[in-house]
Image (cartoon, helix red, strand yellow):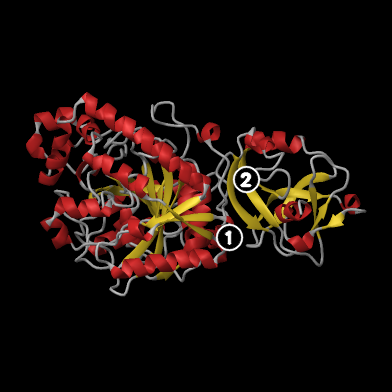
Amino acid sequence: MSDLSASLDLATLRRDYRAGKRDPVSVAEAVLDRIEARGDDKVWIHRVPRAEVLARAKAVAAAGPDGKPLYGVPFAIKDNIDLAGHPTTAACPDFAYVPKDSATVVAKLIAAGAIPIGKTNLDQFATGLVGTRSPYGAPANSFDPAYVSGGSSSGSAIAVAAGLVSFSLGTDTAGSGRVPAAFNNLIGLKPSCGLLSTSGVVPACRSLDCVSIFALTAEDASAVLDVAQGFDAADPFSRDAVVLAPAPIPGDIASCRVGVPRAADLAFFGNDEGQRMFGEAVGLMRQLGARVIEIDFKPFLETARLLYEGPWVAERYAAIRDFIERQPDSLYPVTRQIIGGGDKPRAADAFAAYYRLKALRRTAEAVWSDVDVIVTPTAGRCYTIADVLAEPVKLNSNLGYYTNFMNLLDLSAIAVPAGIQRDGLPFGVTLVAPAFQDRSLLSLGRQLHRAQRPTMGALGLPLPAAEADGAVADPPGAVSVAVFGAHMSGLPLNHELTDLGGRFVRKDRTAPRYRLFALPNVTPAKPGLVRAETGRAIDLEIWRLPVKGFGMFVAGIPGPLSIGKVELASGERVAGFLCENYATDGATDISALGGWRRYLETARG
């Protein structure tokens, strides 16, 4: 009999695989048994046949985990994303087709050892934030079946929250990767547009679409992102993060300036519990050391209204124009009403809205000079299915209050659980930053999630223990490097990392076993880190370099510095700068300051 209770989070799976407690075949069997036990829960539009799932699991097990960062990890795919040999419907039966090839992102995940379980339900043509606009039924909220699951990636969220898969893919144009995460106690990563390829994805608004990730923990989302991201020349909307990535924002909450909308700009739609819990989440960030700053949120809200009140709805119409003009009655009634309105805007309307968007972008950009990240509720309130069916457009619009502006303004975001309301429903917040700050957001999301007393999804399971508190394993072709001094972000030698394709991952600290010295007579100023019997924890940054870039970086390191293994506070060991002991003779011991940045601040007076 397969184990129907064991957690599917990646850290637990990895530990169990290493210990021989489970293997990919037994995990696949357990997943399939769980799905069968739930019956017709409206989560799935198409499931991969049991024999095919088990055959793939056996092949993964036979190949072994080497070079497979997602070895034996079961996952689900929103049914507007292609899986080779299986139908893609976009929740419209008459639209269905069977692709020969998988979407680029799906192919990457399978190559990394992940096992696809099936295609999940969605608001038809990814148009909606409610999860009720599907002829295949409405998947119920995983905490209370009277309430909506959120959309459009409804089935993808439930599949993770209910413990049917380890992670899932959604899409996010207006909030579809975030609202279902909030309503089901999940991490929902909305990556920067173009970071994950949309080749093989049925478009909603093609210029705004992105593939999103639902996961039980931020660490799991990070591991999936490591595999799934990457420039795709076949996708005209793909963007190269290595080329475009800005200087990273702080990866720890204590160093962050956090923007919060003014009270007049917040809306909870009658949910006093949501208002209370948002206040508590902001208070927690303050306790963790963040500097909280009120911001003018009106430019973001005005931008949000452009998405459906402006001509962007015409892009949804253009995405399925041939189909909707041939077979309008094939669409779900509310979906037809919304997308059908896209044939009305004129080209002049599109240009007028584009000009307004550019002006709003310029206004919103000014906010980022004052804050590093913005925090908002993910959604002010969760509604019952009955309420949504009675007022499908108005209540859907309410759910997009904090989400519709995101891709229009080219922002990245992560939805993070923020606790359970007194009525038993989850509440969530979203951390927002400019494009290509995904890694820092994952680090911030991890800290905020773990600073609570969180559980994963709807199963009541606690987050995995400290093994998952550090970085996830390096993806194939990349090496993590710990830097302590002039190579840190914003300092004189940081370009040596970025020039070689380096990417900031997070801030961290060493185990309390090191001494830090300000080395004399070196330009630019540098520290030396030495392991010691009586030491301190020292601040550092983790960067990730391509293997080739790492080799070139190491070759250029001058003595007395070298690369060795540095122990982090979590116990993880990563490559990092160490100093030969002789060089500390006559050097100033600055260990008590806890890091190089604090030393520089002290030196400046």
User: Taking 565 as reference, is 554 above or below it?
Assistant: above
Residue 188 pos. (x, y %): 39, 53
Q: Could one spot residue 231 in this view of the protein?
A: yes
Q: Which mark sits nearer the N-terminus, 2 or 1?
A: 1
Mark 1 neighbour density, 10 Å: few (under 14) some (14–19) many (20 or more): some
Q: Amino acid at mark 1?
A: Ala
Residue 146 pos. (x, y %): 19, 66
Residue nearest the observer in this picture, 479 or 69: 479
User: Taking 59 as reference, is 511 above or below it?
Assistant: below
Q: Amino acid at mark 2?
A: Trp
Residue 541 pos. (x, y %): 65, 50
The quarter of the image holding the N terminus is bottom left
Residue sitting at 64 percent across and 32 percent down? 499
Residue sitting at 75 percent across and 48 percent down? 577
| Element on which disc 2 rests | strand
Distance of mark 2 from mark 1, alpha carbons? 19 Å
In the orientation shown, which residue stands out farthest toward the top?
347
Residue bearing the label numbered 1: 254
| Element on which disc 1 rests | helix
In the orientation shown, which residue stands out farthest toward the left?
329
Residue nearest the observer in this picture, 498 or 370: 370
The quarter of the image holding the C terminus is bottom right
Residue sitting at 34 percent across and 35 percent down? 357
Mark 2 neighbour density, 10 Å: few (under 14) some (14–19) many (20 or more): many
Residue bearing the label numbered 2: 543
Residue nearest the observer in this picture, 323 or 264: 264
Q: Could one spot residue 71 in this view of the protein?
A: no
